Image (cartoon, rainbow, N blue to C red):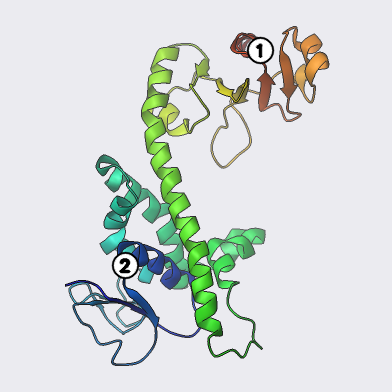
Amino acid sequence: MTITHLVTHSGGFHADELLSSVVLTRLYPKAELLRSRDRELLTPAPNKIIYDVGGHYDAEAQIFDHHQRPSPLREDGQPFSSFGLIWHHYGREYLTALNVPADDIETIHAAIDTKLVLPIDLLDNGAIEPSVAGPLSGLTLPALLESMKPVFDDMSPTANDDAFFESLAIARSFVEAAVRNRAAKERSQSLALDAIAKAGASPILELPMGMPYRSALDKMEADHILFVVNPRGGDWTLNGIKLSNDTFEQRADLPAAWAGLTDKALEEASGVKGAKFCHNARFIAVADSREAIMKMAELAVKAV
């Protein structure tokens, strides 16, 4: 039967039902999204999906609540929120609707679950505290979405619903960007793997464009590669490689003598005509041609 109604609770809102709504409204764009605690509306029916309300988790009946006891748990014992439940049951179909290639569905579904869905689940269930984000706790996605709630003295009878639907558009942008970026990472993998194979024993990796390449380096165990070059617009860039995503430390820095220099000063310091810029932190340099950037890369390797 066609889904005609998507039902979640009225009143204040949290990130989990907002993000669930992103998925469901993409899959059922003609369905009416209702925010209510009316018992009749919360009675399961083949034409409804009910989530984050209703007191039950029954996928066959299309009801996905997590507030009851016992609450639904993942296979590893971590708690679901409504977003986790909706992603578990509808996430793959959602990715298909976003034109993710069939061969990448499982990989991207798992990656989004780990990076986006699980943190929402844990925060919503109190399994982790917002304070784990330290001084950035107020800038997490749940905090930003929930900051869209109406202020305490907004007495409009539609204030909560108005804020919910305004927030839904913003939440959609974040989820779809996460999917696009992850899909792009999968596309870049084969290109980066080919480039690493072509580089062989060279410490310099040349890519056809700026792209994610870290996972390909790890997959190939290419620890010998120290610098990456690629075209960027009309210029070429030379980049260091961070030791990990959690640090700014690099496998190798660009030469100290280049730090903060531009144009003629950098040409003189490097001896490379066409050198244009080197960041003061020595993680990126720019030149006006492939020939110039490769010369800079070779000099950077010798200076290590």
Q: Judge whether residue 77 can be spotted in this image.
A: no
Q: Residue at x 59, y 60 (%)?
A: 133
Within-10-Å neighbours for mark 1: few <14, some 14–19, many 20+: many
Residue that carries the numbered disc 1 in the rendered image: 296
Residue type for callout 2: Leu
Residue where numbered disc 2 is placed: 85
Disc 2, SS: helix
State the residue at coordinates (27%, 56%).
93
Q: Could you say which is closer to the camera, residue 243 or residue 107?
A: 107
The residue at the far front in this view is: 30
> Looking at this view, is 173 or 120 the one in front?
173
Which image quarter: residue 252? top right
Q: Residue at 70% of width from left, 26% of height from top?
A: 282
Tell me which numbered mark, 1 or 2, is placed earlier along the sequence: 2
Foreground of the two, 58 or 1? 1
Q: Label 1: state its secondary structure.
A: helix
Please state, as top left, top right, bottom left or bottom right, where the N terminus lies in the image: bottom left
- Considering only vertical position in the picture, is 40 above or below 62? below
Question: Looking at the picture, how far across and down is residue 65, in whole percent?
Answer: 32, 77
Quadrant in which the C terminus is drawn: top right
Looking at the image, residue 256 sits to the left or right of residue 235; the answer is: right
Residue at image point 62% right, 91% down: 155
- Check the image and name the residue furthest to the right: 265
Quadrant housing residue 147: bottom right
Mark 1 to mark 2 CA distance (whole Å): 51 Å
179 or 137: nearer the eye?
Answer: 179
- Name the kind of residue labelled 1 in the image: Met
